[in-house]
Image: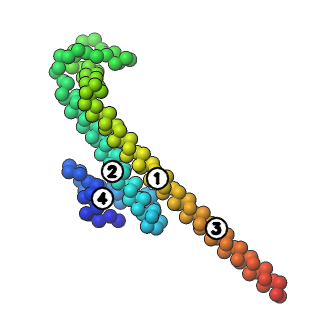
Amino acid sequence: MTSRPAARQVVIRGEDPDEFELFRDRMVQDLDPAGSLEGLLAERVAHLGWRLRRAERLENAAWTTLEAQHVGKASTLVRIKGMGRPEGQGPDDEEAVLARVVVKDFGNAKVLDQLLVYERRIENSLYRTMNELRKQRLMRGVSREQSQEEVSSVKCEVSSKQSQSS
C-alpha cells in the first residue's frame, strides 16, 4: 500500500487524507492486483478515481457559486426550451437562476466547460489505465494457460516415452 507521503501528493487542501487512504485501499483491494505492474496500475486507478470524485465536487461547488452570484439579479430572464415556469414564481426561481448562470458562464468565464474538460481527461486516463490492467491480467492468464499446456505436453511426452520403453 502507498505511504502517507504519497497520499499527500493526491489529496489537496480541504480533503481528508484518511478518507483517501480508505478509498485507495478499497479500490486496490477490489482490483486485486497480482505483481508489481498490476499493483502500480491499481494505484493509478485509485488515484484517478479520487480525482474524478474531486471533479464532481468541484462542478457542484462551481454551480453553487455561480448560482449564488445570480440570485436576486433582475437581469433579463432567459428561457431554456422545455423548461416552463409555474405561475406565481418570480425572476429568482430556480429556472431563471439556472438560465442566467448557464448563459453568463457559457458566454464569459466558461468555468463549467473547463470543469467538464478536466473531468473528461480524468475519465479518459482512468479508462486507459483500466484497459492496461485488463491487458496485463489477460496476458497473465494466457501465460498461465500456456505454462499449463506446456506442462501437460511435457507430461504427455514423458508418459509416452515411459510406455514405449516398457
- Of residues 116 and 61, which is closer to you in this image? 116
| Left or right, residue 40 beside residue 68 | right
Q: Residue 87 appears in which quarter of the rendering?
A: top left
Element marked by disc 2? helix
- Point out which mark residue 130 bears: 1
Identity, as a three-letter code, of the amino acid under mark 2: Trp
Q: Residue furthest top?
A: 87
Q: Within 10 Å of the Cα at label 4, are there few (<14), some (14-19), or many (20+) other Cα atoms?
A: some
- Point out which mark residue 146 bears: 3
Depth check, mark 3 against mark 4: the one in front is 3
C-beta proximity under 8 Å, tags 3 and 2: no
Quadrant housing the N terminus:
bottom left
C-beta proximity under 8 Å, tags 2 and 1: no
Q: Earlier in the sequence, mark 1 or mark 3?
A: 1
Q: Earlier in the sequence, mark 4 or mark 1?
A: 4
Distance, label 1 to label 3, CA atoms, is 24 Å
Q: Earlier in the sequence, mark 3 or mark 2?
A: 2
Distance, label 2 to label 4, CA atoms, is 10 Å
Distance, label 4 to label 1, CA atoms, is 20 Å
Q: Earlier in the sequence, mark 2 or mark 1?
A: 2
Residue to which mark 4 is pinned: 21
| Left or right, residue 50 beside residue 32 | left
Identity, as a three-letter code, of the amino acid under mark 4: Glu
Residue to which mark 2 is pinned: 50
> Which residue appears at 27% of the width and 57% of the height?
9
- Of residues 164 and 88, which is closer to you in this image? 164
- Say how the picture is coloured: rainbow
The percent position of residue 116, horizontal first and vertical second, equals 34, 37
The percent position of residue 53, horizontal first and vertical second, equals 33, 46
User: In this rendering, is residue 48 above or below 58?
Assistant: below
